[in-house]
């Protein structure tokens, strides 16, 4: 049973697990919080098939985008970033 609330296949499930590990490593958050943040952002997605758009970026990109927000421009604002509130 998947820990994610959106549809995954075996490959995307493993990729999302990589994002969870990256979020925990980068931000010192629990895996449970990382999963919750991913579920919040991707709840309505269907991540099935090897050509899905998520694979166009690496897990670090997704970890930072989910943690700081898609409009945070985290790659430009290295010193003044604040995470999106959770939950």
Image (spheres, rainbow, N blue to C red):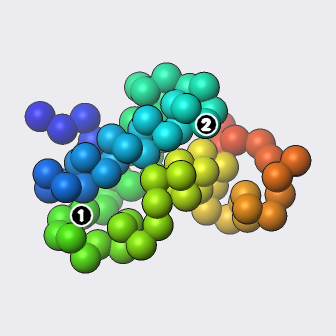
Give the crowd class for mark 1: few <14, some 14-19, many >=20 residues within 10 Å. Answer: some
**How far from the left and from the top, in percent, is residue 26?**
61, 36
Give the crowd class for mark 2: few <14, some 14-19, many >=20 residues within 10 Å. Answer: few
Which residue is found at the position 21% from the left and 70% from the top?
50
Residue 6 visible, this orientation: no
Which one is nearer the viewer's eye here, 40 or 19? 19
Which residue is found at the position 32% from the left and 59% from the top?
44
Does residue 16 appear left or right of residue 86 in this picture? left
Q: Which mark is residue 73?
A: none
| Identity of the residue furthest to the right in this view | 79
**How far from the left and from the top, in percent, is residue 29?**
56, 26
Which one is nearer the viewer's eye here, 44 or 62? 62
Residue 74 visible, this orientation: yes
Does residue 85 appear left or right of residue 49 in this picture? right
Does residue 86 appear left or right of residue 3 in this picture? right
* Residue 25 location, quadrant: top right
Which one is nearer the viewer's eye here, 57 or 66? 57
- Total marks shown come to 2
Frontmost of labels 1 and 2 is 2
Q: Quadrant of the C terminus?
A: top right
Which residue is found at the position 43% from the left and 45% from the top?
19
Q: Specify which label sits upstream in the sequence, 1 or 2.
A: 2
Q: For the residues marked 1 and 2, what is the alpha-carbon distance in whole angstroms? A: 26 Å
Q: Quadrant of the N terminus?
A: top left
* Residue 54 location, quadrant: bottom left
For mark 1, give the secondary structure.
strand
**How far from the left and from the top, in percent, is residue 24?**
52, 31
For mark 2, give the secondary structure.
helix
Residue identified by numbered label 1: 46
Residue identified by numbered label 2: 26
**How far from the left and from the top, in percent, is residue 31?**
43, 27
């Amino acid at each position: 049973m998947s820990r994610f609330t959106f549809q995954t296949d075996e490959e995307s499930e493993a990729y999302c697990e990589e994002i969870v590990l990256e979020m925990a490593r980068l931000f010192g958050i629990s895996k449970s919080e990382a999963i919750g943040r991913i579920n919040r952002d991707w709840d309505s997605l269907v991540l099935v098939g090897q050509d899905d758009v998520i694979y166009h970026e690496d897990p670090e990109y997704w970890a930072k985008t989910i943690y700081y927000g898609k409009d945070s421009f985290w790659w430009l604002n290295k010193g003044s970033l604040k995470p999106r509130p959770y939950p």
